[in-house]
Image (cartoon, grey):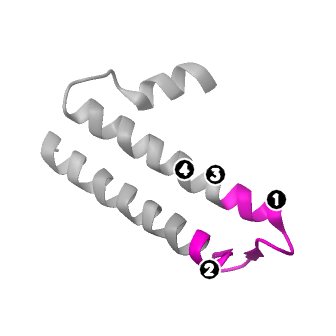
Amino acid sequence: MPQWFIATVFALLGICAAWGIYRSLSSGVAYDEIYRFEIDSNPLGFATVIAGRILVIAFAIAVILHAMGFIGDPISMLRAIFG
């Protein structure tokens, strides 16, 4: 796959995650298909969902930087850490 395509796909993924964070923080509710976390009734679940979206953004930035040639492969770095 061309590097520009990989960077574009992960940029869109990061933008979607950032939009999800913005929407959740402005409404106070984070949800998916199964669970609904309100900041008042379940702050730990709400914070976990926001943290997961932040990790998606961080991974997307790492893949974009790799596609542009600034850093090494983040997927092989994760394999070395966990495998």
- The residue under the point 54% across, 19% down is 80
Q: For residue 51, which numbered disc appears in the image?
A: 3
Give the residue type that dot 1 points to: Leu
Circle 1 residue = 44
Q: Quadrant of the C terminus?
A: top right
Does residue 83 show up?
A: no
Q: For residue 80, which numbered disc appears in the image?
A: none
Query: How far separated are the C-alphas under marks 2 and 3?
Result: 17 Å
Query: Is 5 above or below relative to 23?
Result: above
Q: Earlier in the sequence, mark 3 or mark 1?
A: 1
Tell me if label 4 and label 3 are in contact, CB under 8 Å.
yes
Q: Which of marks 4 and 2 is nearer the N terminus?
A: 2
Residue 41 part of the magenta-drawn span: yes
Residue furthest front in the image: 26
- The residue under the point 59% across, 21% down is 81
Q: Earlier in the sequence, mark 1 or mark 2?
A: 2
Query: How far separated are the C-alphas under marks 4 and 3?
Result: 5 Å
Q: Is mark 3 on a helix, strand or loop?
A: helix
Q: Which numbered disc, 1 or 2, marks the residue closer to the eye?
A: 2
Q: Which numbered disc, 2 or 3, marks the residue closer to the eye?
A: 2
Tell me if label 2 and label 3 are in contact, CB under 8 Å.
no
- The residue under the point 32% across, 51% down is 10
Horizontally, residue 51 falls left or right of residue 5, namely right
Give the magenta-colored segment's residue range. 25-49
Q: For residue 54, which numbered disc appears in the image?
A: 4
Circle 2 residue = 27
Q: Earlier in the sequence, mark 1 or mark 4?
A: 1
Give the residue type that dot 3 points to: Ala
Horizontally, residue 16 falls left or right of residue 32, namely left
Horizontally, residue 36 falls left or right of residue 80, namely right
